[in-house]
Image (cartoon, rainbow, N blue to C red):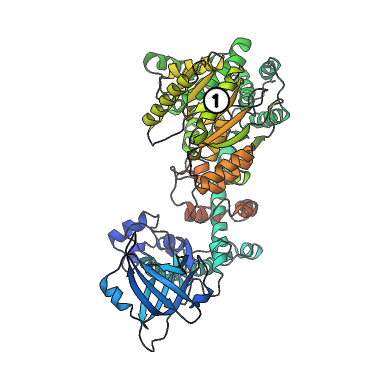
Amino acid sequence: MNAKVDTLATTPVTVLRGVGPRRAQQLARLGVHTVQDLLFHLPLRYQDRTRVMPVGSLRTGDQAVIEVTVDHAEVRFGRRRSLLVRVSDGSGTLMLRFFHFTAAQKQAFARGVRLLCFGEARNGPVMLELVHPEYSLLHDGEPVSVEEALTPIYPTTEGLHQLSWKDLTGQALALLNEGRALQELLPKAVLHDYQLPSLPEAVNLLHRPPPDVSTQLLSENGHPAQRRLAFEELLAHQLSLRLLRRRARALAAPRIVAPGNLARCLQDALPFEPTGAQLRVTDEIAADLASGHPMLRLVQGDVGSGKTLVAALAAARVLEDGWQVALMVPTELLAEQHRQNLAQWFTAPLNIEVGWLTGHYKGRRRETVLERLATGELALVVGTHALFQEDARFARLGLVIVDEQHRFGVHQRLALRNKGNEQVPHQLIMTATPIPRTLAMTAYADLDLSVIDELPPGRQPVKTVVVSDERRSEVVTRVGENCRQGRQAYWVCTLIEESEALQCQAAEDTARELAETLPELRVALVHGRMKAADKEGVMQAFKVGELDLLVATTVIEVGVDVPNASLMIIENAERLGLAQLHQLRGRVGRGAAESHCVLMYHPPLGQLARERLSMLRESNDGFAIARKDLALRGPGEVLGTRQTGEIQFRIADLVRDEALIPQVQALADHLLREHPELTTPLIRRWLGEKVRYAAV
């Protein structure tokens, strides 16, 4: 058979013994359709059953095979009935504990019987124990048989047991080793330069590691074989995004060459000076707009860094040249906030109307906005997902601005890009959720990256404290003191159940309780089930100082800007992720006054929640927080793509494999230049038939 043909990539798993329609369906749930898929379905961890360990050498947490003799067995009655079997091997003694057992089992553990056991050592009341170990009885003179390789433990699904995985991967490896090919897609020079094993070597070792391989190295994913596969998968993702970028850059886009008078007028009318970082990013955008090719730029900036102004200056350049601008945001509340900001900058001083379009616009009002967009009469529009629906058409769309990128998928961005009639519009993507550079370089390799790494002058970091809700009354007293000094405060009620109705009910109860406890304060409530007009009315009243205390659900996470608000209380803070807590905290600290955030939790705290809250208390650095968030939750959660199938890796891990990213980027450029014929097979191997890059 020709080893150059990637036969296992097209060989269905049904060729394997024991894989009928039902088993194939179980495997498909895990993305395993071909023999190649099966070989790339790697173990989660490994057990060392290759040698017998002396009982006396075991420590808590060790997983081991032991050869022992039964000293005593008895059924103990306590809170739970259990069978206790004391065993020893001359080097030490330990206990086998069974909660589920039969009378026949109890009889089998007669004094002097030899056993071969495997289990994890745990601390017991008297000595180390193995709870429900695997075991077999050894007959007189029978030699002890151990495994020849480390035992892989595979990620699985209901109905597929580890013995099945061992059998199936054994068959797949036999096909591989008899000459059925996994095509080697990395040139020999690359394998040599990066010190990577061949693909068959790596796959064989990871499914059947020999006894001398370090289980610790494998558990830490530090083995060259693991690095080999992670490297190739990262490379495939990088290549796919590079191709997306290359194809997009080849398209024609409006060449924005107006002198920039409108942007200068806007800037001159500001009551403050833009920061150096804002001006630097504005210049980068201006260069993109003048290139004649579609701008694809991601602007990252921490909460309050002034991304909206940067977007407005970009919009002014495009509008001056006679093109339309659309700003797409994830929520109506944020759309309203942007509309108000843009109206201050464009409508009164520059006589440019700011239109808006959301899902709540119905009937004639909606039709009017759509007609004015289609004729070009309306040049600047803010909206939600309604902007990329089929009936929204633009006369001359020149710039699409997407706020909070992680709330939208790649396809939604592409849908707006396709709204350009004459040419492809430029895209400016903004996020206040700082994304670690490693993740940004991998997830958004199709985008240029700008960072606003400077806060406006006078901004003070928010002081954060973590308190138990047992001290709730003290916190309420503090809120009263803060507001009596002329400051305003937020009280955020987080999700208590997976139900918006219950969440809103909890917020209503909290607002009523706080109004009764602090009768001198003007207290109001805002939540996601209120009508848009009612929400906007409350938010506007809070913004102009007609309210002292705003009780809210996490609907205020983004977009609300009230400089006089200097205190935020977040209830049940342990229920939220780091990024969301940081976003909420960013609603205060927008004025010159010292601001505080109180993270109130319900004890006891789990380990992960303790880590999250400690991080918030210690740092105001959004990028440091994002890095920790990535380590705790993984890239799919951080980017909001867990449910969309984007940026989900089979083997690579963006935190663990961070050091590989620069090498992978350099190699991606090299392959595109020197070996373009390898790019499509690599992408197909690791991304399959996913369409995320197809619509380019």
Decide if residue 622 is on the left or right side of residue 132: right
Q: Quadrant of the N terminus?
A: bottom left
Q: Pick the residue in front: 188 or 341.
A: 341
Q: Can residue 283 be seen in this view?
A: yes
Picture layout, residue 557 above or below residue 625: above
**Residue 281 place in picture, x, y as percent:** 68, 31
Q: Where is residue 134 in the image (x, y as percent from the top left)?
A: 38, 71
Which quadrant of the figure has residue 190?
A: bottom right
Q: Is residue 620 left or right of residue 129?
A: right
Give the image location of residue 685, x and y in percent. 48, 56
Secondary element under disc 1, as helix, strand or loop, is: helix
Report the number of discs. Answer: 1
Label 1 amino acid? Thr
Residue at the outermost bottom position: 141
Q: In front: 454, or 415? A: 454
Classify 79 as above or below 254. below
Q: Determine crowd level at label 1: few under 14, some 14-19, many 20+ residues with C-alpha closer than 10 A.
A: few
Tell me which residue sits at (41%, 63%) in the image: 35
Question: What residue lies at 59% left-to-right and 17% top-to-bottom?
Answer: 484
Residue 388 position, x and y percent, is 45, 28
The residue wearing badge 1 is 477
Compared with 239, 361 (above or below) is above
> For this view, does 119 lie left or right of residue 324?
left
Whether residue 373 is visible here, answered yes or no, is: no
- Quadrant for residue 129, please give it: bottom left
